[in-house]
Image (spheres, rainbow, N blue to C red):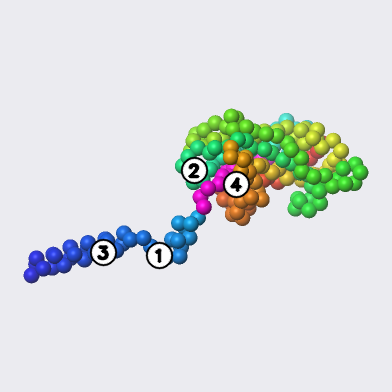
Amino acid sequence: MKNLIKIFLVGMLLIGSTISCSDSELSIDELYDSVNTNGAFIRTIEKPLDLVNVSDPEKNRIEALIEIQEGNGSSQPDFKEVRMYIQTFQDQDQIEPSLDTSGNPTGESFLATFPAADFTPSVTNGLPSTNLSVLTQTVLDNNPNTVFTFPTFIFIRLELEMNDGTIYTNTSVGPSVASGNYFLASFFYNIIFLPN
């Protein structure tokens, strides 16, 4: 009788392990199997100051420490460069753009490029990282006809270009990334700027 129970238990164990190793047909598993893990994003390690100006040497730079991740982060990202763009606004909600001396709204302008060669592996996870740094005087120099309010609100937008020509920015990623809630990878910063 003991042998019969042992044979029965071993048989049940083999059947159970065979069934549990089969692929799931649940909807969530099908969804996970079809998720595209391609793509890349910029993760903010240290964000820029919330308030910058031109005169104070402690606050006259727009600086951020960033790193680049492609896919799930298991391989080194194959990217060309990160570009920084700027647009200034009279309000913090980016509804009223700054105006030029003729009263026309000013648009977005290019601020700086950071090539892949400027990135070094981070100590934390080995992903390429760099410190973006631009003097606030550059904002004034690049926008000589802009009438800056006190305060002016700066919208910094980052663009990541891969070597295959694909570009990622705040408008080409999903809402969880664009909101900044996903690894602080929002592709943009809002900064208060005191122009004098």
Three-letter amino acid code at disc 1?
A: Glu
Give the alpha-carbon distance from disc 1 to disc 2, as whole Å. 28 Å
Image depth: mark 2 or mark 4 in front = 2
Question: Can see residue 67?
Answer: no
Q: Secondary structure at mark 4?
A: loop
Lower sequence index among marks 2 and 4: 2
**163 above or below 9?**
above
> Residue sitting at 59 percent across and 33 percent down?
116
Residue 12's x, y, as percent? 21, 66
Residue 184's x, y, as percent? 59, 47
Please provide the residue range marked out in magenta: 36-50
Three-letter amino acid code at disc 2?
A: Gly
Residue 89's x, y, as percent? 79, 47
What is the crowding at mark 1: few (fewer than 14 residues within 10 Å), some, or many (at least 20)? few
Quadrant into which the N terminus falls: bottom left
Left or right side of 141 for 101: right
The reply to whether dot 2 and dot 4 touch (C-beta < 8 Å) is: no
Give the alpha-carbon distance from disc 3 to disc 4, as whole Å. 44 Å
Q: Which residue is mark 1?
A: 25
Q: Which residue is mark 2?
A: 73
Quadrant into which the C terminus falls: top right
Q: Which residue is mark 3?
A: 16
Q: Camera-side residue: 181 or 109?
A: 109
Whether residue 47 appears in magenta in the rendering, the answer is yes
Left or right side of 86 for 105: right
Query: What number is the disc on residue 185?
Result: 4
Whether residue 4 appears in magenta in the rendering, the answer is no
Three-letter amino acid code at disc 3?
A: Gly
